[in-house]
Image (cartoon, rainbow, N blue to C red):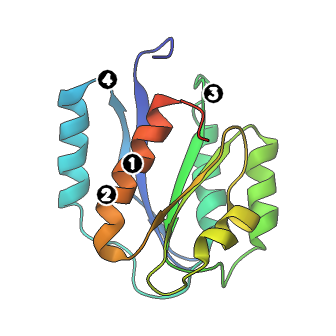
Amino acid sequence: QGKYRRIAVTLVQWSSPAAQFIAVPWTFIDGRESAALFAETVAATPRLTAEGGTSLSTALLFAGALLEENNDAERRVVDISADGRNNSGEEIQNARDALVARGITINGLAILDEIANLHRYFKKNVIGGKDFFVVEAKNYRHYAEAIRRKLVMEISGLPVS
């Protein structure tokens, strides 16, 4: 609905402070066809990171740097999904505050399989900015449904109650 009538998206895979990878480069989505093609690309993309640490802070800073490359965007949103708390890298609140200070919104998807109250941690420490929110996935089986709901909320730009 914005003035460009499209969004630019990229997929970053991450784990520890040494592991952030652009798995799918910046892609414009301007309708059903480009959205379907992007979804197919994401589905076919192999995992590029090894199991290991959870550096939400490094992932946020990496994503923030990618967003800085696009100064024409009306909205800049980092969509971060995780099943754990920040356990390496910079303090998570410092990374969040740095992005929010630059006008970047951080929305979260907390997968509650391993930590039942992870969504509370996200609300307190990870998400921020204009109209920010967190979505919960009860477990890994519910992730696809939760990410779909989250992306619709983000792309529509409608306020979340």
Q: 124 and 51: which one is in front?
A: 124
* Residue 97 found in image quarter: bottom right
Query: Which residue is tagged 2?
Result: 145
Give the residue number, with chain letter if any, for mark 3: 71
Res 87 visible: yes
How many C-alpha atoms fall within 10 Å of the one at disc 3: few (<14), some, or many (≥20)?
few
Disc 2, SS:
helix
Q: Nearer the viewer, mark 2 or mark 3?
A: 2
Foreground tag (4 vs 1): 1
Q: Earlier in the sequence, mark 4 or mark 1?
A: 4
- Amino acid type for the residue under numbered disc 3: Asn
What secondary structure is found at the residue carrying circle 4? loop
For marks 2 and 3, the one nearer the N-term is 3
- Tell me the amino acid under the disc marked 1: Arg
At numbered mark 3, what does the secondary structure look like: helix, strand or loop?
loop
Q: Mark 1 and 2 residues: CB-CB less than 8 Å, in contact?
A: yes
> In which quadrant is the C terminus drawn?
top right
Q: Residues within 10 Å of mark 1 (few under 14, many from 20)?
A: few
Residue 135 position within the rendered picture, expressed as x and y whole percent measured from the top left = 51, 58
Task: Pick whichever, 158 or 70, lies toward us.
Answer: 158
Residue 53 lies, in percent from the top left, at: 55, 86
Q: Which mark is residue 101?
A: none
Image quarter where the N terminus lies is top left
Q: Tell me the tag on residue 30.
A: 4
Q: Which residue is mark 1?
A: 149
- Compare marks 2 and 4 and give the one earlier in the sequence: 4
| Residue at 35% from the left image edge and 66% from the top image edge | 143
